[in-house]
Amino acid sequence: MTMKSNNKDQQGIGIASTYLNFFHAQHLFNFFGHILVFFCGIVIGITLTFSIKKFSFNFQFQDPSFSSNPPPHFPPTPPISSNISNPSNNLTKIPINQNNLVITNTTPPISSKISNPSNNLTKISINQNSLVITNTTNPSSNGLEEFLKIPMAMHNMNEDELFWRATLIPMIHKPPFKQTPKVAFMFLTKGAVLLAPLWEKFFKGNEGLYSIYIHPNPSFDETVYDQNSIFHGRRIPSKEVKWGENSMIEAERRLLANALLDFSNQRFVLLSEACIPLFNFSTIYNYLMNSKKTFIEANDIVSAVGRGRYNYKMKPLIELSQWRKGSQWFQIDRNLALHIVSDNLYFSVFKKFCNPPCYSDEHYLPTLVSIKFWKTNSNRTLTWVDWSKGGAHPAKFIRPHVTIDFLERLRFGSTCEYNGKTTNVCHLFARKFTPHALDRLLRFAPKLMQFN
């Protein structure tokens, strides 16, 4: 009995010892496991920290656009004004209202060109690495001078860009600057202005009160104008014009669009190379500026050269009762010029349905004005022309025709209405004078018309 009890005790002690040894081994294993995890964590942490620092360091130096200072090889430069008409100017200044902030593009210059001839949208590419932002130091500069800057007569805008820019209209009509209104003299010519010496005397001493625009044949060599001539550099981008075709109206609209780029131009006069002035500059300037109406001849003529040219396919936009005929040579204000340049509705109908023997230059403006602007039109032209001999073209005047009596008859030989009153000054210009008449015009006109 005693031996069995001892055996059981010895078995119990062995089992307990086995469990105790197992417990110590398990605890030791857990201890070393924690140590291993701890050291692994330290190694991973050190590795991640080093990698993050290296990534941040590389990122900072690889992307200079995130640097607070400009790159050392592109120092900030003062804003430089650019003229849109001068392609040789490589610096473009874009004014921003807030804080007089100016974005100045250094080399290479901003390129603006049509990427696809059939696409009217302009593609502008900018090199971001050469874009520098500077703050102007001139507190009086507000960017208005840049907006009002007049492009040169010869520019690189295509016609979609030209017409869009020409028809920008400020909603506030009173300008925040002093403006001297000017008359735009627009010459639609085949080549040179044939009577240029006479016009030189006419314009002399009146700088700042007029603008000159010339639309010649694209092949015309303008070196015929001396650099001191008022006509030098006044040629606009032109296209070929054929008599009697819609290209005549297109050229007139092109002249108006270029003249509208100058906000100071308030009156617009269409002239040919064979036109002459009948009065001095101040008389013509005041007559145009003080007039309450525009001057476009628009008559309802029942004959074949009037209603006979009407195309019934123009209905319902243009009815026969609205069809008008008149002189091509007009004198208009800025408001009407803007509407003519922006008109696509009536102009597209004329291009489609008014072709020889329908002559759009004799019908487009008279008809448009009779429909839309009749109340503000005087229904007469200020350009005297002799149609008494009949035919498709007016009479020409050569040297023997030019006498003092003849010129006086053109100046005061008729009566008309001006601002509600009767006057005998009804024509300010006349045509068609040949170069053979120039010597007599230069002899009589300055004294008779009191130039200067």
Image (spheres, grey):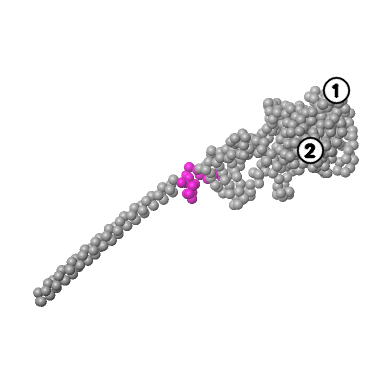
Local packing at callout 1 (Cα closer than 10 Å; few below 14, some 14-19, many 20+) is: few
Q: Secondary structure at mark 1?
A: helix
Asked if residue 162 is positioned above or below residue 170 in the image, the reply reads above
Q: What residue is at 44 percent from the left and 45 percent from the top?
A: 62
For badge 1, the amino acid type reads Pro
* Numbered badge on residue 207: none
| Residue 247 lies in the magenta stretch | no
Residue 64 in magenta stretch: yes
Cα separation, mark 1 vs mark 2, equals 49 Å
Residue highlighted by disc 1: 400
Q: Quadrant of the N terminus?
A: bottom left
**Residue 183 falls left or right of residue 1:** right
Q: Are marks 1 and 2 in contact (CB under 8 Å)?
A: no
- Judging depth in this view, the residue of 31 and 414 nearest the camera is 31
- The quarter holding residue 243 reads top right
Query: Is residue 144 at all visible to an observer of this figure?
Result: yes
Where is mark 2, residue-wise? Answer: 315
- Callout 2 secondary element: loop
Q: Where does the image place residue 342, in percent across and percent down from the top left?
A: 72, 40
Near-viewer residue (12 or 245): 12
Q: Nearer the viewer, residue 202 or 293?
A: 293
Mark nearer the viewer, 1 or 2: 2
Q: Residue at (83%, 23%) from the top-left corner?
A: 399
Q: Is residue 188 visible?
A: no
* Residue at 21% from the left image edge and 63% from the top image edge: 25
Q: Position of residue 69 (x, y in %)?
A: 49, 49
Whether residue 102 sits left or right of residue 417 in the image: it is: left
Quadrant housing the C terminus: top right
Magenta residues, start to end: 63-78
- 204 to the left or right of 395: left
Residue for point 59% across, 38% down: 112
